[in-house]
Image (spheres, helix red, strand yellow):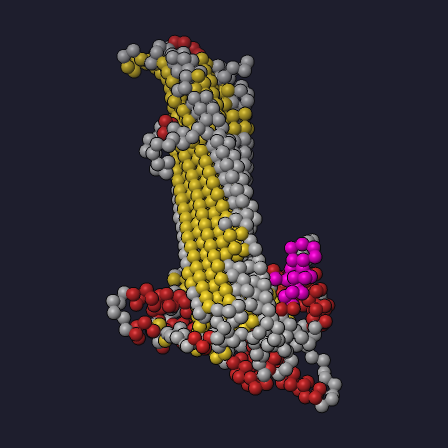
Amino acid sequence: MTTDQTAPGAGVHHVAPGRPGAHATLAAALHAAAPGDEVRVAAGTYEESLRVDRDVTLRAADGGGVTLAASGGGAPALEVLSGARLTLDGLTVRGGAADRPAVLLSGGVTHWHGGGTDRGRLEVLREAALTMTEARLTGAALAGALIRTTGAVRLTDCVLDGAQGTGVVVGGDSRLELTGTRIKGATGSGVRVREDARIVLRDCLIDGAGRSGLLFEDRAAALLVDCRVRDCGGEAVRVLDTSPVPEDGDPYDTPHAGTPEAARGGLLLYGCELTGSGADALHVAGGGDAVLVGCVLRDSGGSGASAGERARVRLADTRIARTTAAALTAHGTARLDARGTTVRGSSANGLLATGSATVRLTDGEVTDCRYSAVHAGGDAELTLTRLRAGNTPEHGLHAVADSRLTLAEVHLTDCGMSGLDLSGTAAAEATELSVARCRNGVVAGSGGAVRLAGCTVADAERAGFTFGGGEAELDGARVLRAGTAGLVCQDGATVRAAHVEITDAAGSGMVVAAGAAPDVRDVRIVRPGKNGLIVDAKGGGTYEDCEITGPGFPAVHLGAAATPVLTRVRVQDADADLSTEDGAEPQVRDCVAWQVKDAHWPAPFAPATAAAGAGATQSAGAPAAGDGTATTVPPTEADLDELLGELHELIGLERVKQDVASLVKLMRMVQRREAAGLAAPPLSRHLVFAGNPGTGKTTVARLYGRILAAVGLLEKGHLVEADRSALVGEYVGHTGPKTQRVFMEAMGGVLFIDEAYSLAPAHATGGNDFAQEAIATLVKLMEDHRDAVVVIVAGYPVEMEHFIDSNPGLASRFNRTLLFEDYGTEDLVQIVEQHAAAHQYELTDAARDTLVGYFDHVPRDGRFGNGRSARQTFQAMTERQAYRVAENDAPSEADLRTLSELDVPELDVPAADPPGAAVPQPPGAGAAVHPA
């Protein structure tokens, strides 16, 4: 046997069975080796069990192919004892069984490069230390590696593959560092950390674990930097408990230290990706404490990040996308804090907070969720600051039970229900809240306190603010272009409203229901489509220093037995300042009317005698209680030509205009036959208006009612708008009276039911849906009052066909459909010009030509709003013009009035059609274009 001397006091021993001068076994070579010697092993499989108790190097000769296989008896193939220093280079160790240790490091220091294990696990126990690089650990059961030592353990560029159980188990006081290491295909969790262990993972991959990617328990702590956890059967990261994150320093600052001591407490993730998990991407429970910075959580089978029990979770600059459950959840007494975090594509809520959880979201975004963007329940407390949320078929923010919201600079857009909705006893305090393009703006039907300051609601399909039960304060609000009413006070609400401006509401500016008595001060209502203020029967309240300008109906309408106190209310540019029903007893103090055709109140600065009775319980000049005077004057035959002229002045709608004109001729012919004593032909005045949104259906319905009144077929001709929510009740016995009440409001006029197809959805399954009862009630009322009310049902063409076919009574009563076609490019340009003229703007020829190109390229998909889109384009042009002119220190009047081609908004054109897209894209796709 030969020994190569390589250094003073060190030698090289060779293991090569059958080779002269070489050892036949590794055990023999180790026995002969002195401390510091090297053993070079020829390729082959050596069935023996080694126990190393000295400093020695085992190196595969000629580049590898050396396997040390356990010799039996259940003992590990390799054991390193206390005090030893072992270096392994290129050796693979095979244990006797997959569920037994192949390598047992019970002490000493081991350096291992290359090779690895191919059966049985690696165990590092007691005070052993290990440094392993470029090794592969496979073929283990129960665990691929078990770390429970006080010594340092570092694995670099290693692979742990296919463990039939947990990939790595770390416990005790262990300190483990993994760098560039992949843990793949474990049937249990990828890494399990428990007790007081600390781990650091840098640039690691945990892939395809059968359960959790990482599992933390007890007082464990971890630091993960630039790691990926993907395609796990359970959670990507599951935390049952951890030590707390230290309070000293900012937890959002990435630690510079790279040792396991950097994981001083809690779970810290920086720049990590958690993707494709079968359950939550991050699940923190117990007393777990987790911080995520710059991470991505997506495509999870549960939530993105979930905090429960006593847990604390903090997120910063983190993106959460495409979650099956709510993207962020907090329950129990958990605390969740997210900064600069975005949520997109949740199949449920964006944020769900229940129990007694505390949540703070700052500078974030929550969009494209299937349920409400934010839902709060229990007695959860949410503080949302500079949050953008929306693009959901439900609510932007929905609070129920005893939850509490604190909102600052929150922006809610494109919500299918309400921007902010409160029910139960939920409470909210909001400053600088803005809601745009939602079905309802703010609905506070809860019994909790609501305080809103500096809030704006724009382009709500229905009401801007609706207050139900409870105490509400509204200060410094703006409501722009509400679809029905700007502000609604329902029975049971205690409302204080001040410094509110309501502009261009399609319905009434402010509606006060029976039993409500709000305190209203300094409210300005501009150009409401109907009344400025309606106080329903038996309603009350105080209204001080308010202004109503340009209403479509009488500025103030009081229902029977209404008792409001009106102080210094100014009405301007109206047909009438006041209309009352029997028994109304207002108190009128210093109210004035200016440029009002039928004025009950004096003009400003008029002598006191002009306001006889002002300040008494009866309005000056108002009809006496019970005198039967009509509150509005219906159109007459003399008004017919003017009404038809108004119809024909509408932009586009040529086919609809012809149909209405033909109906008028037919009705007048019927009247003449009846006057001549001849039998009248069957004539149904009820209509179906079929068309896409924004095509003028409501406008034509309003004119149709007035035209029928002008020819004497309706008593009043007024329009009452309703939808499913106005007709369908919430419990047995509620729907019939609810439908009947709306129908009776329309007596003598037109009942316009928008989105009527929602009463009979194409895929309805019955159950507790009371919509069929509403339809049956409606059909009976139409029969009982066939000459007193005209019903118009409206909606998308295909859906309306299904609606009419859903009930034989509907089919027999709605036998005429008016089709409202989408506006063409020239029509849309004319609508923009019409808005410009109404607001004292002028378009240049170049601006008009650019608009033509713009509307030629706008996709006519499901989001296209026809007239609404034209109005929004005009609004965008005015905003762009304002920014442009602001750069001019001394703009002229022409500068202020002129809209140029520079003010036409750019149109984002996608680079290519998405798969299955049905909408053709304009030429030049691939960049933001400005059509000319």
Residue 929 location (% of width, % of height)? 38, 65
Judging depth in this view, the residue of 741 and 373 nearest the camera is: 741
Using the rendered image of the protein, determine whether residue 335 is visible from the camera's viewpoint.
yes
Residue 88 versus residue 323 in the image, above or below: above
Judging depth in this view, the residue of 248 and 761 nearest the camera is: 248
Question: Which secondary structure dominates the residues rendered in magenta?
Answer: helix
**Among the 4 quarters of the image, the one containing residue 745:** bottom right
In the image, which residues are magenta? Answer: 726-743
Please name the residue shown 56% across and 75% down the image: 623
Residue 524 location (% of width, % of height)? 43, 66
Within the magenta stretch, is there residue 79?
A: no
Residue 251 versus residue 419 in the image, above or below: above
Residue 201 location (% of width, % of height)? 41, 32
Q: In the rendered picture of this protein, how many numbered marks are placed on residues? A: 0
Please name the residue shown 60% across and 69% down the image: 583
Judging depth in this view, the residue of 79 and 881 nearest the camera is: 881
Judging depth in this view, the residue of 215 and 753 nearest the camera is: 753
Residue 722 location (% of width, % of height)? 60, 65
Please name the residue shown 65% across and 55% down the image: 730
Using the rendered image of the protein, determine whether residue 701 is visible from the camera's viewpoint.
no
